Amino acid sequence: MPVAGLHVMPLSKVLQRPGKDPALIAAVLRDDADAVRRLIASGAKLDEVDDGRNTALTFAARDRQTQIARLLIKVGADPGWVDSEGVTPLILASFKNHPKIVALLLAQKERGRPALKDKWGRTAMEYAKRRGKDGAIYQLLTK
């Protein structure tokens, strides 16, 4: 049983970790839109995850990569994906204060799952409220 603050990983996980992010996620982390396009064209799995159940769209939302996020959504990436901490791209974009990404996610059919709470019990709206009701993200979420 793990001790608080001590995280023991099986050896098989340790051996798999170095440089093993899925190629599409690695391209997003490099902010390489051309590589993202090539990988999509070659059949990369859009919602393939890393160890934290993060997808390429999760990282695009986190890092304010609007062009890449738009591309991923256009070809079918799940805008309502939930990672291992209960965080969606919408929650992450709200937390990181990326209004263009929030608007993009809200334009989707399922609207990025705005009512979903992360593991800390917060929604995208609760993160937006921290910046005030005059903030762009709060305004987008209350339309």
Image: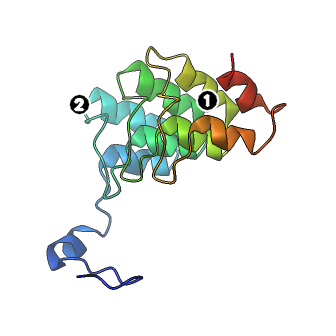
Pick whichever of labels 2 and 1 is earlier in the sequence. Answer: 2
Tell whether 43 sits left or right of 79. left
Instruction: Identify which residue, 99 or 111, lies in the foreground.
Output: 111
Height in image: 67 above or below 56? above
Judged from this view, the residue extending furthest toward the left is: 12
**Spot occupied by residue 123 in the image (x, y as percentages of width and height):** 56, 39
Numbered disc 2: secondary structure = loop
CA–CA distance between discs 2 and 1? 27 Å
Height in image: 55 above or below 8? above
Residue in view at x 55 percent, y 44 percent: 92
User: How dense is the environment of label 1, judged by Cα within 10 Å: few (below 14), some, or many (20 and up)?
Assistant: many
Tell whether 89 sits left or right of 134. left
Q: Nearer the viewer, mark 2 or mark 1?
A: 1
Of the 4 image quadrants, the one containing the N terminus is bottom left
Instruction: Identify which residue, 2 or 98, lies in the foreground.
Output: 2
The disc label shown at residue 42, or none:
none
Tell whether 110 sits left or right of 7. right
The residue indicated by pointer 1 is 102
Q: Amino acid at mark 2?
A: Gly
Q: Amino acid at mark 1?
A: Val
- In terms of image quadrants, where is residue 133? top right
Residue in view at x 46 percent, y 45 percent: 87
**Spot occupied by residue 105 in the image (x, y as percentages of width and height):** 53, 25
**Spot occupied by residue 69 in the image (x, y as percentages of width and height):** 50, 31
Instruction: Identify which residue, 18 or 50, lies in the foreground.
Output: 50
Judged from this view, the residue extending furthest toward the front is: 121
Residue in view at x 53 percent, y 45 percent: 31
Height in image: 42 above or below 54? above
Numbered disc 1: secondary structure = helix
Colouring chosen for the image of the structure:
rainbow
The residue indicated by pointer 2 is 43
User: How dense is the environment of label 2, judged by Cα within 10 Å: few (below 14), some, or many (20 and up)?
Assistant: few
